[in-house]
Amino acid sequence: MEEFLVIGKIVNTHGIRGEIRLLSRFKFKDKVFVKDMPIYIGRNKDKEIINSYRHHKTFEMITLVGYDNINQVLKYKGQMAYIKKSDLKLGSDEYLDKDLIDLDVVIDGVIVGKVTDVNDNGGGNKTLTLLINNKESFVPLIPEFVKVSIPEKKVYVYPIEGMILWE
């Protein structure tokens, strides 16, 4: 079954020519909000194609192929917008937060546990929840402490002195 990823919520229209205003916290906006990208809207996942995109204030503004009037797009107001995960083309060093769940945690060359969650603490700050020796530990998801290798399915953790990961 195809996996869909939420890319934002359609909060309103903009102007009379069918432009749609989305609120999005999606990590890879530059790969999603591009001309000819298929998106899926609402519970029924109505397939639409992005015709144009621009960023305006805190919003992602798009028009859809075949829509040029506000009355045509009003039906999408308040709906969630999705993409198929298979349509998202990520580089070898790029990943979605959900891709980290269940990866092995490696410290000093030894697999010591698993990643159980990724927490967004706001302001771009994230932490990993690790399960090590049946105990939860938290590590900031920053390059100084964590290196992610999706091909290896491993997260390498480099603790500093005083960082308690398990007891």
Image (cartoon, helix red, strand yellow):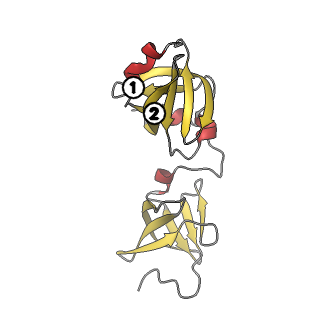
Going by the numbered disc 1, the residue's amino acid type is Lys
- Above/below status of 28 relative to 150: above
**x, y (%) of residue 18?**
51, 18
Q: Is residue 84 visible to us here? A: no
Count of numbered labels shown in the rendering: 2
Question: Which residue appears farthest toward the front when viewing the image?
Answer: 15
Question: Sequence order check: which comes first, mark 2 or mark 1?
Answer: 1
User: On the rendered structure, is 71 left or right of 55?
Assistant: left
User: On the rendered structure, is 92 left or right of 25?
Assistant: right
**x, y (%) of residue 145?**
59, 72
The local crowd at label 2, few if under 14, some if 14 to 19, many if 20 or more residues have their Cα within 10 Å, is many
Quick check: marks 2 and 1 in contact, CB under 8 Å? yes
Q: Is residue 105 visible to us here? A: yes
Query: At x 54% / y 38%, what residue is drawn?
Result: 59
Q: Quadrant of residue 44?
A: top left
Q: CA distance from mark 2 to mark 1?
A: 8 Å
Res 82 label: 2
The local crowd at label 1, few if under 14, some if 14 to 19, many if 20 or more residues have their Cα within 10 Å, is some
Name the element at disc 1. loop
- Above/below status of 98 relative to 106: above
Res 129 label: none
Quadrant including the C terminus: bottom left
Query: At x 50% / y 13%, what residue is drawn?
Result: 69
- Above/below status of 40 relative to 126: above
> Circle 1 sits on which residue?
45
Name the element at disc 2. strand
**x, y (%) of residue 132?**
41, 75
Query: At x 58% / y 54%, what residue is drawn?
Result: 150
Going by the numbered disc 2, the residue's amino acid type is Tyr
